[in-house]
Image (spheres, rainbow, N blue to C red):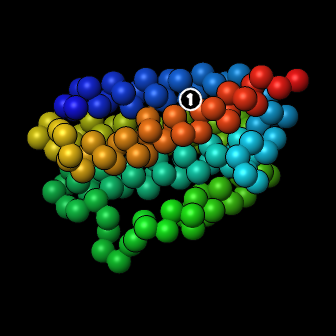
Amino acid sequence: MEKDEVLKEVEAGFEELIATVRALDERAMSRVCVGTWTAKEILAHITGWHRTMTGALERMARGERPTPEGVDYGDADAWNAGFAAGARAQQGATIVAGLQQSFANYVRAARALPPDRFGEGKTANRLLETSSYGHYREHLPALEHLGGRD
């Protein structure tokens, strides 16, 4: 996919995610829905990846490699745990506001990439799929299920 197509996919995926999240009240946001994680923890972890990958996109726009020297994103479980830590104690509205702000920054950084950074097999496409629309699709079923409960 070319830049415009990828960005449309990113934005459509987020619109679907945020519409699902807006349907959840505080009680639903506090329910466990994936393993031991609540909806708040899932959203905090998505926010964490947005923030982290915003930096990667900004580095790419400067012609640098996406990952800073000495950083390894290979242990996703450890990163995820760090992103989700403390989310249960926060209000759902606070987490959703952080999610929306992180997404705005993330998309701004993606838009700053030159068009030649996009295309089949390119890093920008892989990064955007795994940290946005592909990631949202992974978590949507569990979040949608919460909205269907009493």
Q: Quadrant of the N terminus?
A: top left
* 150 over 110 or under it: above or below: above
Q: Residue at x 71, y 22 (%)?
A: 23
Between 17 and 148, which is closer to the camera in this rendering? 148
Measured from the top left, where is residue 75 in percent x and y?
49, 68
Res 92 visible: yes
For label 1, the residue is 17
Question: Is the C terminus in the top left, top right, bottom left or bottom right quadrant?
Answer: top right
The residue located at (68%, 60%) in the rendering is: 85
- Tell how many labels: 1
Label 1 crowding class (10 Å Cα cut-off): few <14, some 14-19, many 20+? many
Check the image and name the residue furthest to the right: 150
Image quadrant assignment for residue 65: bottom left
Q: Position of residue 127 (x, y in %)?
A: 33, 48
Could you tell whether 85 is left or right of 79 in the image?
right
Answer above or below: position of 11 versus 125: above
Disc 1 marks a residue whose amino acid type is: Leu
Res. 91 in view: no
Q: Residue at x 60, y 33 (%)?
A: 140
Residue in view at x 26 percent, y 26 percent: 5
Seen from this angle, which residue lies furthest bottom?
70
Judging from the image, what secondary structure is the residue with disc 1 in?
helix
Q: Is residue 28 left or right of residue 3?
A: right
> Residue 49: percent from the left, percent from the top?
48, 51
Residue 17 relative to residue 69: left or right: right
Res. 98 image quadrant: top right
Q: In the visual, does 65 lie left or right of 24?
A: left
Q: In front here: 103 or 142? A: 142
Residue 71: give x, y in percent of width and height. Answer: 38, 72
